[in-house]
Image (cartoon, rainbow, N blue to C red):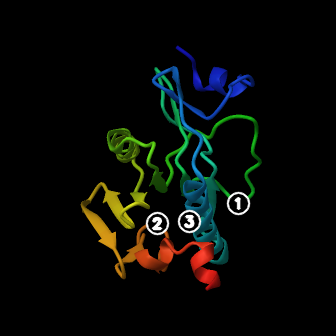
Amino acid sequence: LLTAEEYASLDDLSGPTELVRGEIVELNPPKPEHGLLCTRVGRLLDEFAERQRLGWVFLNDTGVIIDRNPDTVRGPDVWFVGYEKLPVDTEFSGRYLELVPDLAVEILSPSNRRGETIIKVGEYLRIGVSAVCVLDATNQTVHLFSPDQPDTILQGDDIVEFRDVLPGFRISVRELFRLRKERQQ
């Protein structure tokens, strides 16, 4: 079994992976729609968090250590952590961060199995992530999970917000899924 530190030092991995209970798990590279949604969600959250001086937004499956002995390093599609956990003057090293994100976003792709995503959601909630958001591009729905609220499925003109994590952030599901080609018309 590998530790998170040993995993971080590997430079010969042939594609995207995660470390799950000490073992490397290969992932399919995301498809274009998945990448566009990651970019859109990351940009919207980052612009808001920066304007409000709230914290950091990471994407591109940036790894975060979510468990030890055996170690698990997950890479949410997008995640946010406030400055109280990761100060604005943080200098990043070649290691994975070991902290609990405030928000984790996963975007379902046709290659994702729903069960694998639900396992990740459970892991995030177990370690104390305040809000987990799963976007389903096929159905254009947003599934919200939090430890103290019932799970919620949003669609259409329903509003996505993360009151405890990013107070004031609001966007409709329809607008969240609106990609560049639709905005140019």
Q: Secondary structure at mark 3?
A: helix
> With respect to residue 3, does 43 lie above or below?
below
Viewer-proximal residue among 68 and 14: 14
Residue at mark 1:
88
Q: State left or right for residue 20 relative to residue 144.
A: right
Q: Secondary structure at mark 1?
A: loop
Q: Residue at x 34, y 79 (%)?
A: 158
Query: Which tag, 1 or 2, sits closer to the chain's start?
Result: 1
- The amino acid marked with disc number 2 is Val
Query: Which tag, 2 or 3, sits closer to the chain's start?
Result: 3
Residue at mark 3:
41
Nearer to us of marks 2 and 3 is 3
> With respect to residue 12, does 33 lie above or below?
below
Residue 82 seen: no
Q: State left or right for residue 168 relative to residue 89.
A: left
Query: Which tag, 1 or 3, sits closer to the chain's start?
Result: 3
Q: Residue at x 57, y 50 (%)?
A: 31
Quarter occupied by residue 152 = bottom left
Residue 135 rendering spot, x and y as whole percentages: 42, 60
Q: Residue at x 64, y 37 (%)?
A: 96
Disc 1 and disc 3 in contact, CB within 8 angstroms: no
Whole-number angstrom distance, CA of label 2 to CA of label 3: 15 Å
Q: Residue 165 — which label?
A: 2
Few, some or many residues within 10 Å of mark 1 (<14, 14–19, 20+): few
Nearer to us of marks 1 and 2 is 2
Residue 27 seen: yes
Residue 97 rendering spot, x and y as whole percentages: 62, 40
Whole-number angstrom distance, CA of label 1 to CA of label 2: 17 Å
Quarter occupied by residue 3 = top right
Q: Residue 99 — which label?
A: none
- The amino acid marked with disc number 3 is Val
Q: Secondary structure at mark 2?
A: loop
